[in-house]
Amino acid sequence: MFERHSPKRFSDIVTGDKTWLHFFITPPKRLNRMWVDGQVDRPAMLRPGFQSRKRMFTVFFNFRGSLAVDILPQDTSMTLTYYVQDVLSHVKSAINEQRSKVSTSKTLFLHDNAGPHKAKATTQSLHELGIQVLPHPAYSPDFAPFSSKTVKTGTKTTVIINKPNEQQQQQQQQSLAREENMIGQKVREQDKTQIFGLEAAPRIRWVRKDGAAAK
């Protein structure tokens, strides 16, 4: 990806990906406790059907960890206009805030081959910002954080929030944005060494089949 003796650095890479995050409240087991007579069987407790809400999160990372988190509004879809005007502008502001002394022209942008990412308007917008787009390499989980097992479990990314007290529960029911912010904070707290594998790449050593480390 980098030419020999190239001035490009891994720390200049900004990579992003989108995923559906499901969030729900888990009821505590103490709600199922009850007093019953020793001669009476405990009544059966029906298991409630699984219900959850979800939002599409677009998260961008760089060498330091989480850079920008965008939450797609409810009842909307990821369109070209939204990606260019909202997502990319958010990323640009985050880059300028974190790297105030470095021009955006030093940024190497990496995203997958989705339609909005490869559209002419997206390419032109990145070109106007002076951001160079890197070709997306195949089968590279280090460059696709939400495809790795460190962030994704099963087939869907899930964040579980424990049941809050009654006052907090009322506040959460009144404001869906509060829960979205809680999930965004969970994403930002992820260990950068687990999300962005490039930091550990120079320390990787090949191991032969006999178990000896290659020189």
Image (cartoon, rainbow, N blue to C red):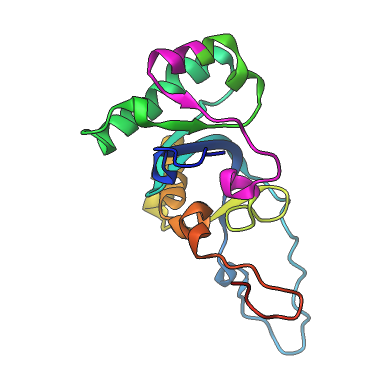
Q: Residue furthest bottom?
A: 38
Please provide percent x and percent y for residue 65: 41, 49
Q: State which quadrant residue 28 falls in.
A: bottom right
Report whether residue 137 is seen.
Answer: yes
Horizontal relation, residue 211 to residue 178: left or right: right
Horizontal relation, residue 158 to residue 91: left or right: right
Q: Residue at x 42, y 47 (%)?
A: 182
Give the answer, above or below, for where 159 lies relative to 27: above
Q: Which part of the image, by quadrant, shows the C terminus?
A: bottom right
- Residue 208 position by quadrant: bottom right
Is residue 7 or residue 187 the one in the foreground?
Answer: 7
Residue 162 visible? The answer is no
- Residue at 57%, 38% (x, y): give it: 1
Q: How many marks?
A: 0
Which residue: 45% across, 37% down?
14
Does residue 116 lie above or below 113 as drawn? above
Q: Nearer the viewer, residue 130 or 157?
A: 130
Residue extent of the magenta highlight: 124-147
Percent x, y of residue 148 = 63, 52
Q: Left or right: where does residue 66 sit relative to residue 52?
A: left
Establish if 188 lies above or below 87: below
Percent x, y of residue 196: 50, 51
Is 139 in the magenta? Answer: yes
In the rendered image of this protein, does residue 52 appear above or below residue 109?
below
